[in-house]
Image (cartoon, rainbow, N blue to C red):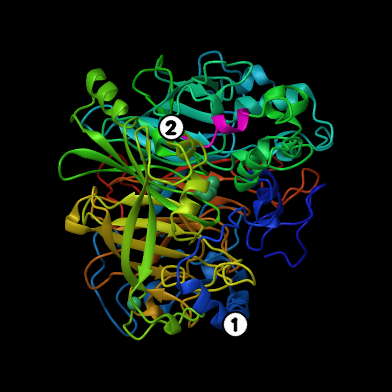
Amino acid sequence: MSTEPRRLLPLLSSHRPGRSAVTCEYRCGNACAHPAPNTSANGYFGDVARSVLSRRGALKATAVMSATAAGFAALAGTAAAEPGVPAALAGRGHGGRPSRPVPGTDFEPVAPNTADAVTVPEGYDHEVVIRWGDPVLPGAPRFDFHNQTAEAQAKQFGYNNDFVGLVPQDSSGWRYLMVVNHEYTTEPHMFPAGTYDPDNPTEEQVRIAWEAHGLSVVQTVRDPQGGLKVVPSRYNRRITLNTEFEVRGPAAGSDYLKTSADPTGRKVFGTQNNCAGGVTPWGTILSGEENIHQYFANADAVTDPVEAERLRRYGFQDGESGRKWERFDKRWDIAKEPNEPNRFGWVVEIDPNDPNSTPIKHTALGRFKHEGANIKITKDGRLAVYSGDDERFEYIYKFVSNGRYKPGRSAHARRHNSRLLDDGTLYVAKFTGDSPAEEIDGSGTLPSDGEFDGRGTWIPLASGNVSHVPGMTAEEVYVFTRLAADKVGATKMDRPEDIEPNPVNGRVYASLTNNSDRGVAGKAGADEANPRNGNRNGQVLEWEEDGGDAAATTFSWRLLLVCGDPAAADTYFGGFDKSQVSPISCPDNVTFDSHGNLWIATDGNALGSNDGLFAVPVDGPNRGQVKQFLTVPIGAEACGPVVTDDVVLVAVQHPGEDGTPEDPDSHWPDGGTSPARPAIVAVWRKGKGGRSGRIGF
Ligand code: FEO
Ligand code: CA
Ligand code: CA
Ligand code: CA
């Protein structure tokens, strides 16, 4: 690990700890450097009692963090040295507690490290599947870092890959459509040193950024030697900020969505900041529009107090935008197009099976900073969609359709099922702890009943055109969902990220990445679901809907993991022996393998290691035994991920983002003096390509 201070790019002066300055500026517009937009008085009874305790908790938390930092100074070595890897995990079945590896997790864990490489367990191979600038469409020119054009980028793989979805094209497991989100652009890294001026980007540079956003669809085939190959196909597609979307659901055609370019409020060009997502049971992709605020300029031009508060609640900023797009298209200027911001912040649906389909924005799922969206079928055959709003003190949501799901992936079934997402009830979650308030002191110390756990309620916000929120119309609930949730007493969470139902045990899992503001004066203090003040390492929440029915309006919940250094007192690994787990920090994207093990990708490791991908059993005696499967290169975040029985895919997002164009700190994946390029990586068992080398057996 370098001992030099991080080098900042021009204009990058403040960012949150644990994450690169450039990431903060370009991914979320330095959201953490600004006050959290949720300043609502909304809070449940526990907040008041706990605020008395929160100062004591904050002091304890600080002490724990110092100890953690000291403990992980040792992690600066290489993977080979394996510092920080619990002895029992460095070799299978030794240490104090020999135990049979759980199917799907039988690999030697990778040690925390800071290598400029993807590091996989002994006995595994990996390879880049596709990287920024690689061809997607026919006629795409070869990537030329020194002569990039918007025309080329429109046909090439976009920047900063995040969510990855695999849609099988047959039952053989050999052919998949791979759909990838391109969350955001980091312009200083996308052009040769000295050619991009953040204060004066050229129009062509801005247009390149528009084409580098959105999604890619590529045809892939399994490689008999291992991994996945991209092949030319009529399915290959780029969706960018210039692709036409249809707005559907109860807010389609709303006055709040009308602009001079679209007086109907039903047609939007583009999608942006697509973060996580999900594959639907009918073979389409849901993708969350997340940090939408940072692309727009001049929120201060709006003086009407109601309108101004709506913009503030979503974090829209005054003055020029960071990327200066408003200079080249007035739709990014709130002073000129005050409704354009309302046309982003939705869950979008892409049908990769039909390259001519018009993508959809589903307004019934509400408008906020959607991390992703994942579906569970209710007992009576309807759809429940879970989605988190990824910002400090924001909420967890669920939508339940009125109509019933039709199994199958025919064009008819896809059309029918997609329509279900336009009509139903949108809920927000309230979590109540079952331990006495005084036992939740913000330190992370387990309460006397041995678990952070309790009960929860789904509070309805709107059903179709009927609002359940006093003082707001249904249309307002959908377009300004954060304000609706504030009014009904939803629980302020520690950055809700990916939420997915487990296909094996039926429970639902949510990553809560971190929240350094928890317990700070004037902010919500710890509660049982968010039990640490100054939370730097995050937690993983698990719940089961009452009756095992995703349509239920009540549920039971508990924390599976309270992440961080296992040696620290404020961490919890599902009750598993903490001397036998890998350290994990800042859980973000999640997925499951076919055994129901949870796989967690991290974003912003606060323990000094590069980010990575981890597997953890959630049932049986090994519940909570976190094992690190891979690490990603310097500065990168691990995204995706996809885990099939014989290949793992991870999206390596923003490698080298801490460096400057003049002095890069990553050349991954191409090495030499090449620029770092975000890429999708496949991992498989060495010498067991195709379908013979099963992951983690
Ligand atoms: Fe795009 Fe919530 O991470
Ligand atoms: Ca409890
Ligand atoms: Ca994320
Ligand atoms: Ca996921």
Q: Residues within 10 Å of mark 2 (few under 14, many from 20)?
A: many
Where disc 1 sits, the SS reads helix
The C terminus lies in quadrant:
bottom left
Task: Judge: label 1 CB < 8 Å from ligand 2.
Answer: no
Residue 341's label in the rendered image is none
Tell me the residue at 35%/86% (across/down). 448
The three-letter amino acid code for the residue at tag 2 is Thr
The N terminus lies in quadrant:
bottom right
Residue 363's label in the rendered image is 2
Task: Judge: label 2 CB < 8 Å from ligand 1.
Answer: no
Where is residue 553? Give x, y as percent: 27, 53
The three-letter amino acid code for the residue at tag 1 is Ala
Q: Quadrant of residue 669?
A: top right
Q: Is residue 167 above or below residue 313?
A: above
Residue topped by disc 1: 67
Tell me the residue at 18%/55% (across/down). 548
Lateral position of residue 51 relative to residue 511, left or right: right
Boundaries of the magenta span? 339-346
Residues at marks 2 and 1, CA–CA distance in whole angstroms: 46 Å
Lateral position of residue 166 relative to residue 532, left or right: left
Is 644 or 534 nearer to us in this picture? Answer: 534
